[in-house]
Image (spheres, coloured by chain):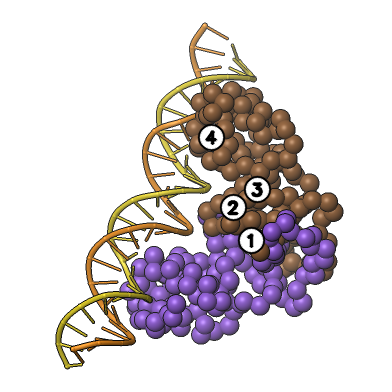
Chain colours: A purple, B brown, C orange, D yellow
Amino acid sequence: MGLRPTRQRVALAGLLFRQGDRHVSAESLHDEVTKAGFEVSLATVYNTLHQFTEAGLLQQVVVDAGRSYFDTNIGDHQHFYYADEGELIDIPGAAIAIAGVPTPPKGTAVERVDVIVRIKRA
Amino acid sequence: MGLRPTRQRVALAGLLFRQGDRHVSAESLHDEVTKAGFEVSLATVYNTLHQFTEAGLLQQVVVDAGRSYFDTNIGDHQHFYYADEGELIDIPGAAIAIAGVPTPPKGTAVERVDVIVRIKRA
DNA sequence: CAATAGATTAGAATTGTTCTAAGAACGGAA
DNA sequence: TTCCGTTCTTAGAACAATTCTAATCTATTG
């Protein structure tokens, strides 16, 4: 599945990968691309985000029922989720150490371990 | 906020807490309660699950965009998520050890650390 | 027993996401 | 190049999960 460099995809890729690490929702990226003067439907933003994710360019992080983000940082790392603000923050520095992940049920293998540290106004 | 023992709530609590640990979605619990002969709307199931969660009787686990489960096991534990089947499984035995959780941003405190081990057919 | 305040329920509305069908781009053959 | 079959792309429409709100019900108080 070679992705063609269409107008829509180029615009989205530009916004996503121009600067450093970003966390976007489909909605927020759609706003951005629209404000930048491109006509791209929200459905296309979803399609593109999923294609980029499948291609290994993005990582999807699900934080709440009906709220997911796409992260341009695809390295092995974890997140703070600040529910009050709906904000997702990369955990800086060394990743959290996770020890003793048990063997998964027969016939299955571990694909990924997601860690979300939920934080609150103190 | 004292929860009244209404017909709907009693029926749902019965199903939830009669047997051991359970993972239910709003939908699946609604099916169950309906098949058990009670008339409860799906919205009420949602309301009730959230109230129970707030009361500390349940824990909500979000696994996918638009897919969340409520877990009657409120102890400190983690989950396997078997995406192929959409199935959530408690990690048995000792919990995964998580070390080196960094201090959260100023003015915030850690509320909870969610760990989801995503597994796949090998 | 009436009046009031608060809690409850579920239909309707909203939101987030996915599907599908129409159209566009590509590659090969003539 | 032009035609044609195939594959890819897009976005409107459909869908699904969740939340909101207003009508109703229950408890409490005077």
Image coords of residue B17 (percent x, y): 71, 33
A40 sits left or right of B70 in the view: left
Q: Which residue is mark 3?
A: B60
Instruction: Measure the alpha-carbon separation of dots 4 and 1.
Output: 28 Å
> What amino acid type is highlighted by mark number 1?
Arg
Towards the viewer: A83 or C28: C28
Q: Can I make out residue A41 in this image?
A: yes
Counting residues from the start of the chain, the first of labels 2 and 3 encountered is 3
Q: Which residue is mark 1?
A: B121
Instruction: Measure the alpha-carbon separation of dots 2 and 3.
Output: 19 Å
In the rendered image, the quadrant that contains the C terminus of chain A is bottom right
Counting residues from the start of the chain, the first of labels 3 and 4 encountered is 4
* Residue drawn at x 73%, y 55% as measured from the top left: A105
Instruction: Measure the alpha-carbon separation of dots 1 and 3.
Output: 25 Å
* Residue drawn at x 77%, y 77% as measured from the top left: A94
Image coords of residue A120 (percent x, y): 69, 58
> What amino acid type is highlighted by mark number 4?
Asp
A33 sits left or right of B29 in the view: left
Instruction: Measure the alpha-carbon separation of dots 2 and 1.
Output: 10 Å
Q: Nearer the viewer, mark 4 or mark 2?
A: 2
Towards the viewer: C17 or C9: C17
**Corner quadrant of residue B46:** top right
Q: Which residue is mark 4?
A: B31
